[in-house]
Image: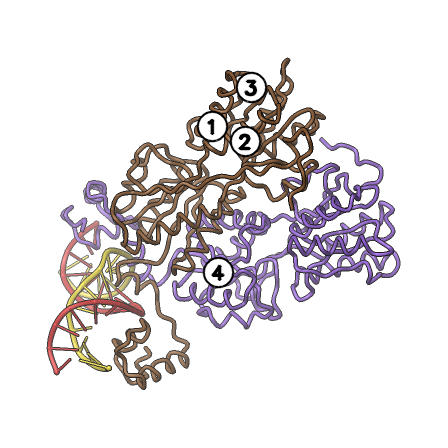
Chain colours: A brown, B purple, C red, D yellow
DNA sequence: TTGAAAGCGCTAACAC
DNA sequence: GTGTTAGCGCTTTCAA
């Protein structure tokens, strides 16, 4: 093509790949020809020849959930720095769909895969990927442990949030939990249990396990607060359920923090807009994405010892008015 | 590879591509060998040979904005149906970055590109893409008109929202507008102007142009309501500025709908959680994504007349308590 | 219905 | 430093 610059294809290739040993004059001629002809290197052919791509797959279950949105942001920022493009795949929390996403990435010879797994076991999806494709698990672990994992200390976050309510003097602290068959659901529930048991014994009537979705949170809250001996506080274990629970409290006419103290999970952009503003267990989600991408980039570069790593980030309790009987002082 | 099934590569290829003229017995043998060897077709080589990919590029400016999130969802749902994977590119509202995204898609030989353009002129980016790559513009048009476009009737949405406030008896209806150099900012402002001028004359003191961001909305609202003759209502022209404006109103101690009537733009998941719930001009964003993907899929299939099409979807005013002096009746 | 062979656009050995 | 050439793994004529 651009040999119409009077050189061989090899030289053009060398210019394109910034190899130093090209004569400056010839390099100029090549560059000029490329510009003149509007030539663009074919990445498909390049990938085939090099037997590698610069594409990552990112498999998540719900693009509309702000948690994943922040995660994508983090992943994408680092991916761009490292020169990778990101294919977004939607597993919709379904193991079959997840498997198809992974098969697709295997066929496309993705350079790496980041996944927030719906599957319980790593073996359920690992064989689908060519062994050469590195995988980083995000936020949820699997039963097999021989894979990189980036996560948030959910147990700690739930513990801190629950304990905060107890310290504020709430006596019957309820928990709207995710399903126990997910690692996030389970570990957050364990944090709640630990805090509650430190202060006495756990009351099963104060616990509702639901599905991490908005309607689930709504129903669980209605159910809890209509019971004969309702709670005086509640911690809700993710952002969507928190939305549902807050709607329920409003519908029931219960006021925060007097009638009920509330702690949500995940930072919500509008948490501070509520009256009173909502106390939440904030997760460093963008950082989670960055860390996952960091790890994957290093795996792709091959400059890491072989054994799998786990990176754990700390959540941060942000106390606002919804959980403090004496109104929290304003922080600047 | 799978010729260890005793047939030629050509036959294997035919099986893989579901071509009918293969002997059933041989087909079985091939399938069996594929399963046994765990073979996966190399999509990179396939794409090279076929001179086409099954990948779309989706270029947006802010993954964390729920508007784009819903858009992505729509695009991805249809893309999956049509057998395309979606690469997510981040232009960050920057024309240079946008250009690089487009160049990347050109190199990767994407089958099509969906873009919510930061550039004003189509000519700014069209030459970057091989003329064979179809493009669909989303939500914002460019000065050149020879390209497919999917949009929402923003003028109408802003008009409906403003007129609603006037009909509720508000006399000084302010507008927190996006920048006039964007199509969405401009057309929404024009809708506002039309409604206001129908009822009298426009008062420039009631208009603030800012940047579609949360802090911008906050500052604009503070500025408006601290002025000597403040408005008694405001329409805010996108979701992020609405968040900022609501924070400002709360900080100023102004109550909706009494002190001030408020209409937001874009549906917000938590609009109904506020007290009173927020009236908004809802946009069918997921449908916008679906429509864009539909159009692109048809362009990729080549089964369309050549001339560019524009698809316009209608917004829908959702009246809640923040804009109705007599409390809106509850809808089921 | 099947197989042999060409070739997609590029990079990397190798020879000069 | 530079050119020649082989092939990456697939699909697709073409001939059998």
Give the image location of residue B37, x and y in percent: 19, 43
- Residues flagged by tags 2 and 3 on a common chain: yes
Q: Residues within 10 Å of mark 2 (few under 14, many from 20)?
A: many
Q: Which residue is mark 3?
A: A206
- Classed neighbour count for the residue bearing mark 4: other residues with Cα under 10 Å, few (<14), some (14–19), many (≥20): many
Q: Read off the residue under disc 1.
A: A191
Task: Measure how far apart labels 1 and 2 are at the Cα level.
Answer: 9 Å
Q: Secondary structure at mark 3?
A: helix
Chain identifier of the residue bearing label 3 in the image: A
Label pair 1/2, CB-CB below 8 angstroms: yes
> With B47 as the anchor, is A260 left or right in this view?
right
Contact (CB < 8 A) between labels 4 and 3? no
Residue A22 point in image, percent of width and height: 27, 80
Q: Earlier in the sequence, mark 1 or mark 2?
A: 2
What residue is rendered at 51% in x and 53% in y? B293
The front one of B308 and B247 is B247
The quadrant in which residue A288 appears is top left
Would residue B115 appear left or right of A53 to someone viewing this image?
right
- Mark 2 or 3: in front is 2
Q: Nearer the observer, disc 1 or disc 3?
A: 1
Tell me the distance, in whole angstroms, between the alpha carbons under discs 4 and 2: 45 Å
Give the SS element for disc 1: helix
- Mark 1 Cα within 10 Å, few/some/many (few <14, many 20+)? many
């Amino acid at each position: 093509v651009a040999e119409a610059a009077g050189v061989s294809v090899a030289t053009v290739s060398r210019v394109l790949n910034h190899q130093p040993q090209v004569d400056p004059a010839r390099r100029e001629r090549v560059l000029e020809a490329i510009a003149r002809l509007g030539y663009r290197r074919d990445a498909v052919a390049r990938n085939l020849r090099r037997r590698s791509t610069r594409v990552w797959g990112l498999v998540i279950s719900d693009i509309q959930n702000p948690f994943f949105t922040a995660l994508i942001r983090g992943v994408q920022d680092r991916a761009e720095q490292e020169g990778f493009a990101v294919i977004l795949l939607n597993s919709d929390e379904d193991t079959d769909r997840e498997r198809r996403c992974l098969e697709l990435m295997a066929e496309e010879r993705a350079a790496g895969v980041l996944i927030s797994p719906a599957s319980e076991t790593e073996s359920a999806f690992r064989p689908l990927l060519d062994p050469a494709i590195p995988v980083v698990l995000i936020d949820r672990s699997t039963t097999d442990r021989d894979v990189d994992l980036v996560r948030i200390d959910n147990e700690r976050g739930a513990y801190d949030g629950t304990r905060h309510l107890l310290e504020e003097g709430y006596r019957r602290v309820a928990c709207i939990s995710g399903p126990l068959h997910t690692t996030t659901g389970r570990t957050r529930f364990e944090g709640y249990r630990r805090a509650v048991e430190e202060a006495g014994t756990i009351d099963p009537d104060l616990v509702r396990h639901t599905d991490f979705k908005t309607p689930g949170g709504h129903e669980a809250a209605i159910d809890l607060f209509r019971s004969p001996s309702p709670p005086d506080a509640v911690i809700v274990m993710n952002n969507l359920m928190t939305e549902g629970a807050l709607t329920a409290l409003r519908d029931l006419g219960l006021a925060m923090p007097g009638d009920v103290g509330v702690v949500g999970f995940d930072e919500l952009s509008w948490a501070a807009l509520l009256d009173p503003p909502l106390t939440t267990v904030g997760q460093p989600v963008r950082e989670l994405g960055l860390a996952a991408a960091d790890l994957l980039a290093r795996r792709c570069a091959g400059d890491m010892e072989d054994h799998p790593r786990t990176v754990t980030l700390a959540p941060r309790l942000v106390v606002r008015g919804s959980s403090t009987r004496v109104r929290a002082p304003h922080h600047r």
